[in-house]
Image (spheres, helix red, strand yellow):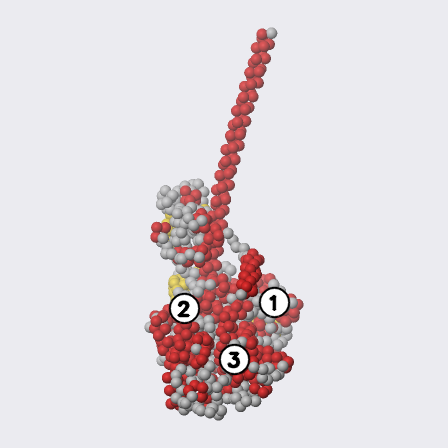
Amino acid sequence: MLISVLAITALGLVFGLGLGWASIRFHVKSDPLVERIDALLPQTQCGQCGYPGCRPYAEAISKEEADINQCPPGGETGIRALADLLGREPKPLNPENGEEKPRTVVVIDEARCIGCTLCIQACPVDAIVGAAKLMHTVIESECTGCNLCLPPCPVDCIDIIETKPGILSWRSPRPMTENIMAAAQ
Amino acid sequence: MRQSRQVELARDAGKHIHHFHGGLRLRHNKKISCQDPVERPPLPELLIVPLLQHAGDSADPYVNVGDKVLKGQQIGQCQPCAAIHSPVSGVVEAIEDLPMSHPSGQAGPCVVIRPDGREEWVDLKPINDWRTCAPEDLIMQMQDCGLAGLGGAVFPTHAKARDGRDRKIHTLILNGSECEPYISCDEMLMREQPDKIVLGARIMCRALGADRIIIAIEDQMGAVQRALTHAAECAECKRTSVVKVTTIYPEGGERQLIQVLTGLEVPAGGRPSDLGMVCQNVATAAAVADAVAEGKPLIERYITVTGNGIEHPRNFQALFGTPFSHLVEHSGGYTKDVARLVVGGPMMGYPVASDATPVVKGSNCVLALTHQDIAGYQPEMPCIRCGECARVCPATLLPQQLHLQIKNGLWEQAAEYGLSACIECGCCDFVCPSHIPLVQWFRYGKGQQRQRALELDATERARKRFEDKEARLLRAKQERAEKMARRKQMLKDKAAQQDQIKASIKRAESRGTAQDDA
Amino acid sequence: MTRNFETGGAPHMPQKTAVATVMLQVLLALVPGVLAYTWFFGPGMLIQIILATVFALLFETLLLRWRGRPLKPFINDYSAVVTAVLFALCIPPLAPWWITCIAMLFAIVFAKHLYGGLGQNVFNPAMVGYVVVLISFPQAMTAWLPPLALAEHSLGLVDTLLTIFTGQVPLEGGWDAITQATPLDTLKTGVESGRMVPEIRNSPLFGDYGGMGWEWIANWFALGGLFLLYKRVISWQVPLAVLGSVILLSLPFWLADPDSNPFPLQHVFSGALVLAAFFIATDPVSGCVSNRGRLIFGAGVGIITLVIRRWGGYPDGVAFAVLLMNMAAPLIDRYTRPRMYGE
């Protein structure tokens, strides 16, 4: 009786020590949590989440001050990715922060632009090129669609346009047969 | 494998026939379209020439509506892709979006030309001294004549040649092993114009700086072998050999062909030029001969019109822009039970919705299938992990794993398991007992990967620009603060200076009064 | 004049294979063995097969309905029938009907559908069903019959039916009158009580290699297995590894001590080893994907079977071996991924 107790205790000690050693020896170094959260955010820097940029929002999430469903440009895929990373339940997008819309870019109507540079200062990714009293123009490939340049413009010369899908951006569709199976009852 | 052993094997290309993993033995169905000699069909009423005929961006139109064009005149330009030329002399009737030969079925910009029947050529500029001129001139001629790979991938020939020139190419492989069932245009070309092919090969050899030429054909093409060997002898080209490869689909794939000829594998993510070889289709070689020796730009190609849905299958030498309906009309029309029209072969081709679709550089075959051929709808069952797909995959991938990963959005794992190495040959699809449309899944997966890569790239750029802007604003703030501090300092110094001056004036004054007093 | 067509996906060629075809070929390959079994042991086996098939299809239908899946393609793919037949071949021919029912419940409902249905089961369903009833009802599961040629009393068709459905043997003496230990069981108890193997094998219960009757059944199953190999339904790696590892591992033991260890081929032709090698361990869903993986999987099944036979508590450990290797299969897959072109 005593021997079996001692034997089990000894085994427990040995395995416990082994596990402890393994957790140190095989520890996987990973980026700090804030970096990993920031990597999943869309970098639009629009502020719809309530924070001045994606990095502050990432920091707030890591400190558990903000919820994961506050980012409209990231959309449902973004929320799912954050939920996966943090081990939480995915939630629907909070409608107070906005709604998920297709990606848009802005264009400046050069005829109306007065060269005030207010939009240049407002753009968080410096996607507008120009200088005081000179023409302003938006670099389409760098515009993230955050729309922060629209409020400051005094002559309202900035328009939102949807990116048109063309032949080059066409992707093969997802096969539909799996849905046909489920529907054929 | 050691570098030297690799080079040795590469230089011995064609001496032994190796095997690649997997593959299928398929029924050929090629004889039905090889009964008649190849002809040019009569001119259609309208020619619809798409401006997107090659891998890459759309070409820009070089002409306007109402312009009169000559045969071979450039109508579309695109740097650095292949140019597009008018296949006939006539009038440009419209430049508009029309349905084209594309898997998406979407419309794209096309130049519509009404031929005037006179077939006047533009001034042709052949290179007569191709044996002695600079190779770069040959490559420029290829670019100006709009040459692109006619095997199906439509890669601009001059780009391949230039890339080959930059590395040491020793062997040019001409791919005459048309492995997909039904397609016979390359075989007919090799039977009817072997001299042109050999000439084109020699010109390309000169442009690349290669030592030897291997023409690979299927082991069933006896007449072709004789024709090509004879042509090579006539041209006194000692460096050309005609090699027969075993007919297992897809031995005509570039990577598989190189493996069969040399036993070497093209490194993952690399190109055949890494092994010192360049692979071109025989039709491309013939086009090179036309372009250099006669100055003719690429405006037509051999195309097979075949299938059980065509009354009289045959091959044509069709101008680009000819609608498929015109070709079908001149091959006896459709049979009663025709059900689907496919561009390409039955394994890798894509269906088109309308036969108004025009012939383009990449159209090697128009296949009309009957209801029996496509065997109706078979429901997709779950994967039973039988492993047949992995047994037949020529790229030694694991299609069942890739399929699961794509279905569940595990993109990193799919990339690790080699999704981008898939050549979309359709062997796995063909043997799957659960009828899973694997090739469709892989095409979808590759598209999603590309999309994600583009989006990730854009996100990274946005993040960088944001951080740079923050840094810039911070720097500006710091500089302003420093400037303020300096000015304050200067003012303080100025005040101190003023005090000093006042003090010395006072001292001077007091000295002055002291002197007065004394 | 242009014409419009409907589109569809590649490849644009008729495909001859189907899941149902694969399963039917497996059933066809089992026929010789089943016939041999009936010849040597009577009609009980056929009744068990029919019973198992009925229960399997019943549970499959119920579960498909419950999960909201379409019935037609899944019932017609015969995978439940294959599970049922393989299970029926492993149990005593006179096992009561409720044994088969419970086993099929666990096999189809728990081991197959609760893991996701066709193609998703981690464990071999037939083996799960067998192991569950083996452990829960040891008495009923060890009531084996001797071959007809050796039996003192044998039951006709009607009596067999009565036994299966009522659980009572309609003979004087009841169960003890007709049941007898299997050859492997006799061997195990004999060796444990100190007798020599050649002496044990002198009994008429044993044939030249395996048990009398059993070795012939194994032969016929092997024939069916070769048919499957020819038709490319299974790959050669698993049967070779299972049988090869058994032979290779038992050889040194027999050479060292032929008195307490059977000859390697005797191991091969006893029990369910040949059936497992060609039909059970080759189940594609619960096995390994790559060829190297399959060799390791088969070797594992062979080794564990031998270990259980020699040192374990059960006379034949094939079912446990298969289930244990099913557990290891994903790990084996991960480490035996084949090299891709160009890597």
The image position of residue B9, as x and y in percent, is: 63, 71
Marks 3 and 1: same chain?
A: no
Q: Closer to the observer: label 2 or label 1?
A: 2
Is residue B53 left or right of A26 when viewed as pictured?
left
User: Which residue is label 3 attached to?
Assistant: C315
As measured in the structure, the alpha-carbon distance from the residue carrying label 2 to the one carrying label 1 is 39 Å
Q: Quadrant of residue B271?
A: bottom right
Secondary-structure class at tag 1: loop
Q: Position of residue A15 (x, y in %)?
A: 55, 61
Q: Residue at 57%, 13% (x, y): give it.
A: B510
User: Which quarter of the image is occupied by the N terminus of chain B?
Assistant: bottom right
Q: Is residue A35 above or below residue B25?
A: above
Q: Chain of mark 1?
A: B
Residue wearing tag 2: A175
Query: Could you tell me residue B20's position as x and y percent?
Result: 56, 74
**Are there few (<14), some (14-19), or many (20+) residues within 10 Å of tag 3?**
many
The numbered mark at residue C327 is none
Residue positioned most to the right: B4
- The answer to whether marks 2 and 3 mark residues whose Cβ atoms lie closer than 8 Å is no
Q: How many numbered circles does the render carry?
A: 3
